[in-house]
Image (cartoon, rainbow, N blue to C red):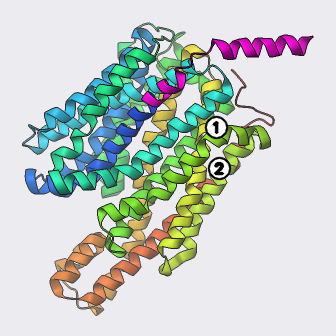
Amino acid sequence: MTTLVRLRSESASGADRDPRRWVGLGVLCASLLIVVMDLTVLNVALPAIAVDLRPSSTELLWMVDVYGLAVAGFLVTASGLADRFGRRRMLLIGYAAFGAVPLLVLFADTAGWLIALRALLGLGGAFIMPSTMSMIRDLFTDATERAVALGLWGAMAAVGGGLGPIIGGVLVQNFGWHAAFLINTPIMVLAIGFALWLLPESHGRAMPWDIPGIVLSIVGMVALMYSIKTFGKHGLADPSAAAAAFVAVVSLGTFGWRCLRRREPLLDIRLLRKPVLSAGLLCALVSSIAMAAMMLLLAQWMQLVEHYTPIETGIRLLPVAIVSGVISPLAPHLAKLIGTRAVMAGGLAVGGAGFATLYLGGGHLDYTLVAVSQALVGVSMATLAIGSAVIVAAVPAERTGNAAAMEETSFEVGNALGVAILGSIAAAMFRDLLNPGSLKSLGVGGADVDTARESVGGALAVADDLHLPVLAEHARSAFTDALAMVGLAGGILMMLAAVAVWFMTPRGLTIADGH
């Protein structure tokens, strides 16, 4: 009798679900696809932008970095605004920013203007990301369906990262760099229309205004991201990075102290006491650390060592997106078979094996091995959907915005740390292999030594200027060895994280387990 009642209840619950929820998910997935594509398109467009606007090297760095600074800085504030004024409303504001800013790019004739517009896009991204995750919880009340939805949504990040360079390369090559940004506008116009039609409005718990807390969170996160990025580019001795790190520690420490003392804080840091939530956030942080470094270095390796064009490089970076897109919807069913803990920890371990595969190639790395590595990493990225489902299930519904802000912050900080830490390992090994003694024996002297040791691009430029093909070959070999070492470091990091997640996640946990 009890079973019959339960079955009838589940049947009624299924019947009450809005059949348009999957179309609504499509709208949310399309928006994430555009957000990620916009990030990768900039990398393809930078050479053309440099020729047209003639920015300084510092301005070029700001063009790349300002988006992440703005997103990370405003995530907590945006999630609080969404809880108070409506998640769909904040999502639409983000969509409007991503649709309108590219139109303003058409009139950008200075580097400073373009940097400001990139910052506005970052604000739009901060409104989109936590609202999207919260709305997926509203649309999908069934835990298994929600995990599938989060898997499909998360796979869009990998697909966008793969398609961005291809589409961006075609647009820049045929229509100029402005066109690479304009692709956002028509898609966001459609997204706004469908969002108004398909997505329900929802609110979290409206917390009392905490203006000092808002200021501290923005200043602290911007300073943290700036210090990480600057340390990665200029080393630990950089005074501006040290000052920013000090500001970050003071601001975020004070922000955390305020949140712990307030009964209804802007960000409920006490949620981190839940080991399950912390395990999910650790998955997001470590995966993004490894992925950011891998995609950056592989793109350089393919173009500068293997001589692929940007479009060919984009195509050859697709295995991660393809594998992740195929497996993500299956991850919840796998979690039912072998357990949530096994999927979360096992996904990190498989990703670690993928990174270690790069090390196996050593100085003789070829694309076949790289494709295998990407496929394994794609499997790992697919299992992040389970981590997201666990994060959502670990908090009360009214705190979903907080959980989403924490996860997205983990991704943003992880991206910065990946480039800074693993990128620095690659740079240090490259400089060690191209030491002044070996360069002198090849006929390189004076200022050319420093230029050649700065990057593989610099070494190839020196080799071209001095007509030294042996230097070019030596530089390519050194960069391949450095890539292999990053693969080993990334593999070890993901394996250690897999062990930590295994012990942090309770035995028998399911994706339906609530707070």
Q: Quadrant of residue 126?
A: top left
98 vs 71, nearest the viewer: 98
- Badge 2 vs badge 1, beta-carbon distance below 8 Å: yes
Q: Which residue is mark 1?
A: 386
Disc 1 residue type (three-letter): Ile
Near-viewer residue (498 or 421): 498
- Residue 215 visible somewhere in the drawing: no
Q: Residue at image x 40%, y 12%?
A: 210
Residue 291 is covered by the magenta coloring:
no
**Dividing the image into 4 quarters, which one contains the C terminus?**
top right
On the image, the x and y values in percent for residue 461 come to 21, 76
Residue 341 is situated, as x and y percent measured from the top left of the image, at 73, 41
Callout 1 crowding tier (Cα within 10 Å): few <14, some 14–19, many ≥20: many
Give the alpha-carbon distance from disc 2 to disc 1, as whole Å.
Answer: 10 Å
Is 436 left or right of 385, judged from the image as shown? left
Point out the stretch of residues depicted in magenta. Answer: 1-27
Q: Is residue 467 above or below residue 90?
A: below
What residue do we see at 49% from left, 14% from top?
265
- Which type of secondary structure does the marked residue at label 1 adopt? helix
In the displayed structure, does residue 314 sit left or right of residue 114? right
Q: Which residue is mark 2?
A: 347
Q: Secondary structure at mark 2?
A: helix
Q: Nearer the viewer, residue 194 or 141?
A: 194
